Image (tube, rainbow, N blue to C red):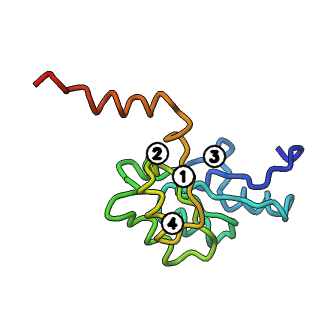
């Protein structure tokens, strides 16, 4: 990875077990020691993980995995006017990159209004099959009632 000199590297910063049993703290410090100038983004799934990643010193905190892990199952990033993001933004010192189910222009606008540093739209624009499915699902019952 370092041969291509990426601007930012995103790392799994969840509490999930790593293949070699290494803790996030040890993994983070190992990478930081070897590549002190590399920008690192924490891909997190819970408020607690985001707080921890911020305390560790990740350059960017991402909400990437909210709702996608066993510890965040059922969580929806947009619930209660993006309460998860609002809670995190009140406390972290590193920039928050809002990512994960931010799939409409209205959601993008709102998370930026709340103070997110940037937004990753992702599959809402990169996966045409999902875009098409939204339209198909919306018209499934038209004329069948």
Q: Nearer the viewer, residue 41 or 22?
A: 41
- Position in image of residue 112 (x %, y %): 51, 66
Mark 1 or 4: the one toward you: 4
Q: CA distance from mark 2 to mark 4?
A: 22 Å
Q: CA distance from mark 3 to mark 4?
A: 32 Å
Q: Which residue is mark 2?
A: 68
Give the left or right position of residue 58, taking residue 115 as reference: right
User: Which SS class for mark 3?
Assistant: loop
Residue at figure coordinates x 43%, y 50% from the top left: 104
Give the class, few, some or many, for how many residues have Cα within 10 Å of label 2's Cα (few <14, many ≥20): some
Q: Which residue is mark 3?
A: 18
* 2 or 4: tag closer to the N-terminus: 2
Give the class, few, some or many, for how many residues have Cα within 10 Å of label 1's Cα (few <14, many ≥20): many
- Contact? badges 2 and 4 (CB < 8 Å): no
Residue 144's place in the image compared with 87, above or below, is above
The image's mark for residue 64 is 1
Q: Nearer the viewer, residue 31 or 1?
A: 1
- Position in image of residue 58 (x %, y %): 68, 65
Q: Quadrant of residue 39?
A: bottom right
Residue at figure coordinates x 74%, y 55% from the top left: 8
Residue at figure coordinates x 14%, y 21% from the top left: 144
Q: CA distance from mark 1 to mark 3?
A: 18 Å
The image's mark for residue 112 is 4
* 3 or 4: tag closer to the N-terminus: 3
Give the class, few, some or many, for how many residues have Cα within 10 Å of label 3's Cα (few <14, many ≥20): few
């Amino acid at each position: 990875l370092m041969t291509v000199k990426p601007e930012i590297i995103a790392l799994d910063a969840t509490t999930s077990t790593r293949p070699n049993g290494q803790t996030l703290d040890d993994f983070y410090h190992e990478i930081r020691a070897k590549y002190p100038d590399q920008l690192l983004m924490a891909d997190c799934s819970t408020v607690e993980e985001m707080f921890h990643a911020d305390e560790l010193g990740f350059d960017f905190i991402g909400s990437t995995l909210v709702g996608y892990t066993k510890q965040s199952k059922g969580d929806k990033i947009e619930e209660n006017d993006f309460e998860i993001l609002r809670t995190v933004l009140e406390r972290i010192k590193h920039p928050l990159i809002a990512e994960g189910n931010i799939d409409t222009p209205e959601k993008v606008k709102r998370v930026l209004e709340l103070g997110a540093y940037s937004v990753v739209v992702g599959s809402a624009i990169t996966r045409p099959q999902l875009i098409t499915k939204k339209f198909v699902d919306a018209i499934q019952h038209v004329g069948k009632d």
